[in-house]
Image: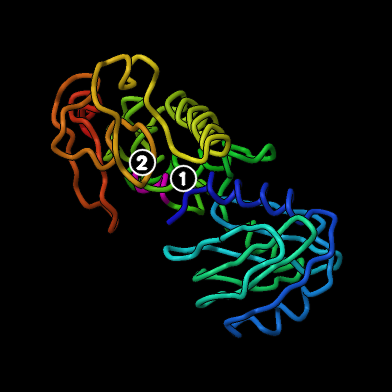
Amino acid sequence: MPEGHTVHRLAVEHQRMFGGRRVAASSPQGRFADGAAWLDGRVLVVADAHGKHLLLGFDDERTLHVHLGIYGRFVFGAVPAPVPVGAVRLRLVGGGGYADLRGPSTCELLDPGDVKLLRDRLGPDPLRGDADPGVAWRRVSRARTPIAVLLMDQSVVAGPGNIYRAEVLFRQGIDPRLPGRRLASEQWAAIWADLVVLMADGVRDGRIDTVRPEHMPEAMGRPPRVDGHGGEVYVYRRAGLPCLVCGARVRTVELAARNLFWCPGCQPPVSGG
């Protein structure tokens, strides 16, 4: 599933391509025909993202809400748009190009009240200027749940996924199994600050790189990582390989139905945790 930086990049691209312009909308697949008919001919006023949710506001009160889920994706191109091929849920066409949406878990029109309900159930997003990390901390500091699970809970923090949660905990030297209530406030502040920087880098670069300069391939004389899930990382999908920092073997375990990766040397368990 795309992590939050990808959805923020999609918001930027929609704003660049359609912002302030009227769009032609259609649903070649037919599953969003009524929604596309309502969008057709409207002006895109604002493209926004909150966590993994894309919110496109048009010149009326309703908002197009898209959640890509596991299989969803957008394809952008120049006009004239080609004949749609396959299951295109929604096509938007404007002076700046076209966008085809395929396979989302959610594609719907929301009234203002529904948008508020959606935002209210999401945690703060490290990529948003209006985010309040204190809101997340209040939940984290009371939880018996491991911090690795809390970081994947979109009602606690909106946007991070499996890669960012593994990498930020490694970078901060925190045992991912540590209950939230045993995390120090200074540790939470460091996690949040790191997410803000790492995810902003992801928006800029279109990939997830979490490795510090001194551990990059050219600095260490090692081969670069080859993985379709992103760039240079410390522990994500590196189970059984030596840690780039201490040499211990990276471990993995299933936690809350997702594979968790961590280094037992750099992220030692806290006594009583």
Looking at this view, is 135 or 158 the one in front? 158
Name the residue type under label 1: Pro
**Vertical arrangement, residue 180 with respect to residue 170, above or below:** below
The picture places residue 152, in percent across and down from the top left corner, at 41, 49
Quick check: is 234 in the magenta stretch? no
Q: Which residues are magenta?
A: 148-152
The structure's colour scheme is: rainbow
Residue at image point 60% right, 65% down: 66
The picture places residue 211, in percent across and down from the top left corner, at 37, 25
Number of residues whose C-alpha sits closer than 10 Å to that of mark 2, classed few (under 14), some (14–19) or many (20 or more): many
Q: Which mark is first along the chain, 1 or 2?
A: 2
**Which of the labelled discs sits on residue 160, or is there none?**
1
Residue at image point 58% right, 57% down: 53
Residue at image point 28% right, 58% down: 257
Name the residue type under label 2: Ile
Tell me, yes or no, if residue 134 can be seen here: no
* Residue beneath disc 2: 147
